[in-house]
Image (spheres, rainbow, N blue to C red):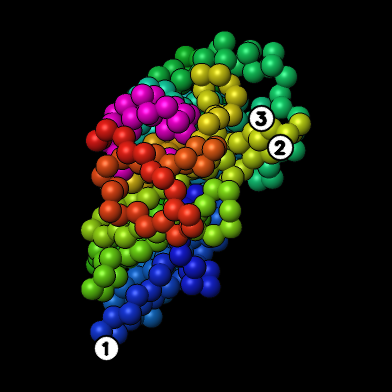
């Protein structure tokens, strides 16, 4: 995940502006199992409190509704899908199924929320990371043979069924981005046009921070602190997936939480993938899909193009950096020695 430049616990580097300084409202929420930092530019305290209270209610509702293995709407869906019969899908889940199905198709199935059983088999369907050992190979093969896909779902209005009883939905690689998009929409409806919503380091920013763009940091995947910083303005999302987020080590090997739906094993080869896109749900899903695709540019670049992202930066497990030419001149590396960067073809 991205870690924005530190100001106590707030993710945004607040840059000096001309006097008198417009008000900045900042607040931090605990939801979706992470800290969500909200920073609003040129918003006074009363208006800021009202706006963040609205976001907090929305985030709490979405977290409860979209949790795959707890009691709630998505949990109920996962209980009913193996039966193969039509049932009424909770309205809070329908948009996620539709949107994630679109993104799964675009990614060629590398982003696949239907593999919830694999996620659980590896122990990542829990608030606590597993400690190993890895699952038995025959258990992984058994699930792979069933080949759960989003295309196995049939959705007619709010009526839902699955043609494949192995489908279990887990939106963990997508829901946070979708929620951030909803938060930005809510802020705009409240008339706020300059804001940043950072959910555990993955963020979407709109407008500017006064006369300057927003500046955020990208976490180093292997060292404390930041690898790089980037300026963003207008309307842009920046999401990072990394093998340092949720993982376990067993017999000297790291097993991360992003599962390759083709092999049934955790993705390998990349320490972090940072994706730039306008919409946060696209950036979130793309970070997962590109992690699965791996470090070979011939594999990840077509996925990035298909998903319509605007920029990608990869760090492989050897510390080598690749990025798309669209990020040239935007990424400022905060480490010495600065890494040598290899640029891909344009998106």
Residue 249's mark?
2
Q: Are marks 3 and 1 in contact (CB under 8 Å)?
A: no
* Main SS class of the magenta portion in the image: helix
Residue 255 % position (x, y): 64, 33
Q: Residue at x 36, y 24 (%)?
A: 298
Residue at image position (29%, 77%) is 42
Quick check: 157 left or right of 58?
Answer: left
Residue 150: image x %, image y %? 43, 23
Residue with the most extreme top position: 145
Q: Residue at x 28, y 80 (%)?
A: 17
Single out the mark in the foreground, 3 or 1: 1
Residue holding disc 1: 19
Q: Secondary structure at mark 1?
A: loop
- Mark 1 crowd level (few <14, some 14–19, many ≥20, 10 Å Cα): few
User: Label 3 to label 1, Cα distance in Å?
Assistant: 54 Å
As for residue 279 lying within the magenta part, the answer is no
Asked which secondary structure carries label 3, the reply is: loop
Task: Return the disc, 3 or 1, that comes first in the chain's sequence.
Answer: 1
Determine whether, in the image, residue 318 is placed left or right of residue 21.
right
Q: Secondary structure at mark 2?
A: strand
Q: Which circle's residue, 1 or 2, is located before the other in the chain?
A: 1
Residue 127 vertical placement versus 297 (above, below):
below
Q: Which residues are magenta?
A: 289-314
């Amino acid at each position: 995940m991205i870690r924005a430049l530190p100001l106590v616990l707030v993710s945004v580097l607040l840059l000096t502006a001309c006097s008198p300084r417009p008000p900045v409202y900042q607040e931090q929420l605990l939801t979706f199992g992470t800290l969500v930092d909200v920073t609003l530019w040129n918003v006074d305290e009363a208006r800021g409190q009202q706006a963040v209270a609205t976001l907090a209610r929305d985030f709490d509702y979405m977290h409860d509704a979209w949790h795959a293995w707890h009691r709630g709407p998505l949990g109920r869906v996962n209980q009913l899908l193996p039966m193969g019969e039509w049932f009424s899908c909770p309205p809070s889940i329908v948009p996620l199924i539709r949107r994630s199905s679109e993104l799964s198709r675009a990614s060629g199935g590398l982003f696949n929320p239907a593999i919830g059983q694999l996620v659980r088999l590896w122990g990542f369907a829990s608030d606590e990371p597993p400690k190993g050992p890895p699952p038995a190979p025959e258990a992984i093969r058994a699930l792979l043979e069933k080949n759960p896909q989003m295309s196995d779902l049939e959705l007619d209005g709010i009526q839902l069924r699955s043609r494949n009883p192995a489908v279990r939905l887990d939106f963990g690689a997508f829901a946070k981005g979708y929620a951030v998009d909803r938060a930005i929409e809510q802020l705009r409806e409240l008339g706020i046009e300059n804001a940043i919503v950072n959910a555990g380091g993955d963020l979407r920013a709109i407008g500017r921070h006064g006369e300057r763009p927003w500046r955020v940091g990208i976490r180093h995947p292997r060292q404390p602190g930041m690898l790089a910083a980037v300026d963003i303005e207008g309307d842009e999302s920046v999401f990072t997936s990394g093998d340092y987020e949720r993982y376990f080590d067993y017999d000297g090997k790291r097993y991360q939480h992003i599962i390759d739906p083709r092999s049934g094993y955790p993705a390998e080869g990349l320490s972090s993938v940072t994706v730039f896109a306008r919409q946060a749900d696209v950036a979130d899903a793309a970070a997962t899909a590109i992690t699965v695709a791996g470090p070979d540019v011939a594999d990840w670049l077509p996925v990035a193009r298909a998903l319509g992202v605007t920029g990608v930066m990869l760090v492989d497990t050897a510390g080598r950096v690749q990025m798309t030419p669209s990020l040239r001149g935007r990424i400022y590396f905060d480490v010495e020695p600065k890494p040598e960067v290899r640029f891909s073809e344009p998106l």
